[in-house]
Structures are given as C-alpha cells and as structure tokens.
Image (cartoon, grey):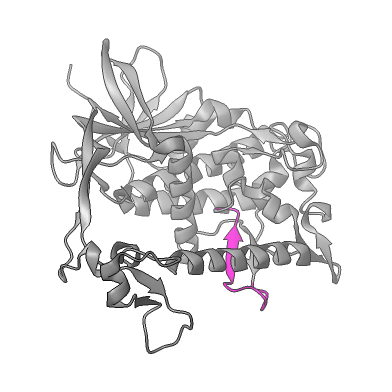
C-alpha cells in the first residue's frame, strides 16, 4: 500500500479533528547529538547528582534509556516560546504578570503566568494585588482572581479568558482557599525527550596553570583591608612559609584559583543510539472541558468547540515553536532532528494515521484565526493583567536577595 503523503494542517482540519472522535495528535521525532552519532550528551541530574535512567520496552526488547528532557521541562520550554511570540507581537495571549520593581530590591524582575511554576494558581500571584475600583485588592479576592475559586472542567470559560495556557499545560490550585480541593485540570499536551540505547560515560576535570604556581609557594592570607589596588589575598612572609608556620585562616594558592588542579575522573554523560522526542496533544482531554457563558450552568456545544479549537491551536503552536527553536537543552546537550517534524492524527482505530506538516508561521496563523472566531462567539479573552506584589512579599524577596548577595561575597573571599 502506497504511504499517504502528509497534508498541510489547516484551521478547518483542526476543527474537524477537535469536534470529531479523534483521540490525539502525535509527533514523534528522532534526534542525534549535534556532534554526530557517538558524541556524548549530558542529561539533567537530579537529587544526589543522579541521572534518570530506566529500562524501557521498545519493539519488544528491553532497552537502556536515560531521560534527556522531562515532561515538566518540555512544558516550560513551550510556555517560554509562547511568551517570546507574545513579546514579538506574533500572537495575543492573556497573561498575568507580577512586577517586582520596588526601589528597595537589588534586582527588579517580572514573573508571568507563563513562567510561574503553578501558572495562574501560583503563590506569587496569590500574594500580589491588583487595582480594582481605584484601590489595591489581593488578586485572589478580586473579581478576576475569584475565577479560579470556582473553575473546573465543567466551568472553564473564566479560566480560558485569563489564563488559557493553564487549560493546556495543566493546573492545580492547591495554594488557594480550597487547598487540595482547588481547581485541577490535567495536562492536555505532554512532551518528553529520551535517550535510547544509553550507556554511561566518564567525565574528567583538570587545570594546568600557565603561571606554574606551586603549593609550596604559599600559604596565602586574607588581606585585612580590601581596596581597589590589591587582590583580596596577600602572601604570607617567606620566612614563615619556609619554616612551615601555619597561620590562622591560611589558604593554598588553589583556593584563590591559582595553581594546577589535579586531574580527576568521575561518571558523567551518556552515549546514545538516538534520542526520541514524543509530543502528544490529547483531544479527548480537551473535550472534557466545558465553557458556559452569561452565568449559565450548561454550555453551548458551539462555544465549547470554539474554545477547544483555540486550546488545541495553542498547544500545537507551543510545540512547533519549541521544535523550530532547536534542542540546545543545556551545556553539552545539543541535539538536532534527524527527520522532518510530522504530526499524526490518531483517529479511526486500525486505520493508517493521517499525517500533517505544520510550521511556525502556519501555526501562528491558525491560532490567531481561532482566537478571532472565539471572540466573535463572545468567549472571554482578557488583555494582560498586571499585579503588584504585596509589600510583605517585596520585603521577603529583598531579604532573600541580600542574603544571596552576602553568600556570593563570602564564597568569593
């Protein structure tokens, strides 16, 4: 049987898939290290410096694997790609942001709902205020903040309007007034990168000092008074060094980054046969969401479809933008795709999946048109919601920044 040629995904094809019985869109892509087959990659480490290794059953065989990029990390990458698209003006997306710009802070910054670990339900937003009727109100006590108190999968229209990404990447309002009973929405899109046929390697470290400073040339002492004309250390008198006199707080030259570092060898990195990125958008999960309007308890199926199409387009956009950015995941872990990005629609059981191509420009166009139609159906779609951190939260951050600065200073001395 001749293999079906991939089609270009359009908004109408997406709408047909969302409103029909299809289970999911799936994109499975093989990668190789940027240095070529056999080059070592360094996956993330977890508690105790351990790698996430496991044996998986692939094509009926047990295969050693290592996690290269987790579901959580992939979601964060998609959210940041969407945030960049907003900043570039390519898309409009409801975003909540808390602006830490108080003059008392050592470093000002902004946290958005595309960066906060728990999205709209994060404690950062809970402990920030928003202007309402001319006064500052705690966000979760405001009209927009209260949306989260009563949101669930049968009443998701409010959440759709202020933070649609929470309906795509999942949210659990465990820090809210209802605690563990707070709004909980599962991830609709899941992505992961795994190294297959993974074998652990070793990592070496050493440093050759061009000055060839020897251990016996010390010891060094802290300089009592710091200034801009001398290093923070001073060399001990040569007489005491020759006599082996051990001064209080004496340091080796290597402790101020002079001298050789003895070569060491330890476990580190993996060689892999290949890496696989698997992204799945569950259309079944999106169909569980209902979007009632105008205070009604029951939603209109037409409104449900419009909102679900927006969410599907949003998930696909995040995945496509992330793929096209490339997979330079961390130091010594850059991967390149070995094949074209193809999306499969898992529709009729037992039949060959329909294959689609989707690039970033088309994904942006599909999303923008889907949002336009949703607005025409009077589905909510807020502008940016700007919050101000409560003074107590500002003070907590200020003290933390000062402690961090002091710690950095102590480590450098």
The residue closer to the viewer here, 358 or 329, is 329
Residue 103 in sight from this viewpoint: yes
Q: Quadrant of residue 412?
A: bottom left
Quarter of the picture containing the C terminus is bottom left
The residue closer to the viewer here, 63 or 399, is 399
Coordinates of residue 169 in the picture (x, y in percent): 54, 40
Work out whether 332 lies above or below 257: above
Is 129 magenta? The answer is: no
Whether residue 58 sits left or right of residue 263 in the image: it is: right
Q: Residue furthest bottom?
A: 229
Which residue lies at the image location 74% right of the left edge and 39% below the top edge?
Answer: 151
Which residue lies at the image location 27% right of the left edge and 21% below the top edge?
Answer: 64
Coordinates of residue 230 in the picture (x, y in percent): 37, 85
The magenta stretch spans which residues? 101-114
Whether residue 229 sits left or right of residue 155 in the image: it is: left
Q: Is the magenta region chiefly helix, strand or loop?
A: loop
Which residue lies at the image location 18% right of the left edge and 16% below the top edge?
Answer: 1
Residue 378 in sight from this viewpoint: no
Whether residue 396 sits left or right of residue 255 in the image: it is: right
Q: Quadrant of residue 302?
A: top right
The residue closer to the viewer here, 350 or 140, is 140
Coordinates of residue 237 in the picture (x, y in percent): 32, 78
Coordinates of residue 266 in the picture (x, y in percent): 26, 39
């Amino acid at each position: 049987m001749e293999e079906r040629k991939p089609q270009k995904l359009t908004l109408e094809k997406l709408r047909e898939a969302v409103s029909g019985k299809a289970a999911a869109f799936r994109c499975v892509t093989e990668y190789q290290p940027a240095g070529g087959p056999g080059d070592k990659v360094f996956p993330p480490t977890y508690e105790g410096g351990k790698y996430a290794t496991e044996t998986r059953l692939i094509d009926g065989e047990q295969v050693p694997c290592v996690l290269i990029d987790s579901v959580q990390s992939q979601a964060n990458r998609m959210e940041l790609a969407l945030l960049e698209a907003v900043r570039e003006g390519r898309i409009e997306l409801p975003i909540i942001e808390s602006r830490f710009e108080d003059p008392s802070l050592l470093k000002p910054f902004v946290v958005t709902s595309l960066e906060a670990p728990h999205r709209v339900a994060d404690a950062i937003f809970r402990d920030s205020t928003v202007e309402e009727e001319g006064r500052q109100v705690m966000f979760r006590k405001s009209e927009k903040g209260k949306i989260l108190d009563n949101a669930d999968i049968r009443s998701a229209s409010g959440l759709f309007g202020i933070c649609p990404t929470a309906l795509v990447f999942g949210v659990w309002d465990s820090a809210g007034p209802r605690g563990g009973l707070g709004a909980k929405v599962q991830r609709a899109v899941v992505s992961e990168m795994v190294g297959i046929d993974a074998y652990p390697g070793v990592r070496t470290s050493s440093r050759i000092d061009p000055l060839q400073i020897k251990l016996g040339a010390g010891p060094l002492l802290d300089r009592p008074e710091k200034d801009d004309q001398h290093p923070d250390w001073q060399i001990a008198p040569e007489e005491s060094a020759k006599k082996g006199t051990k001064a209080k707080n004496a340091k080796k030259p290597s402790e101020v980054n002079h001298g050789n570092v003895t070569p060491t060898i330890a476990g580190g990195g993996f060689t892999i046969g290949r890496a696989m990125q698997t992204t799945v958008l569950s259309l079944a999960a999106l169909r569980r969401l209902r979007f009632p309007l105008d205070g009604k308890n029951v939603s209109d199926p037409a409104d449900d479809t419009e909102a679900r199409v927006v969410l599907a387009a949003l998930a696909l956009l995040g995945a496509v933008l992330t793929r096209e950015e490339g997979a330079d995941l961390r130091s010594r872990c850059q991967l390149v795709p070995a094949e074209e990005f193809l999306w499969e629609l898992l529709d009729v059981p037992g039949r060959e999946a329909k294959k689609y191509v989707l690039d970033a420009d088309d994904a942006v166009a599909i999303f923008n048109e889907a949002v336009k139609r949703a607005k025409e159906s009077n589905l909510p779609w807020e502008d940016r919601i700007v919050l101000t951190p409560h003074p107590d939260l500002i003070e907590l951050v200020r003290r933390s920044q000062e402690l961090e600065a002091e710690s950095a200073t102590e480590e450098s001395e």
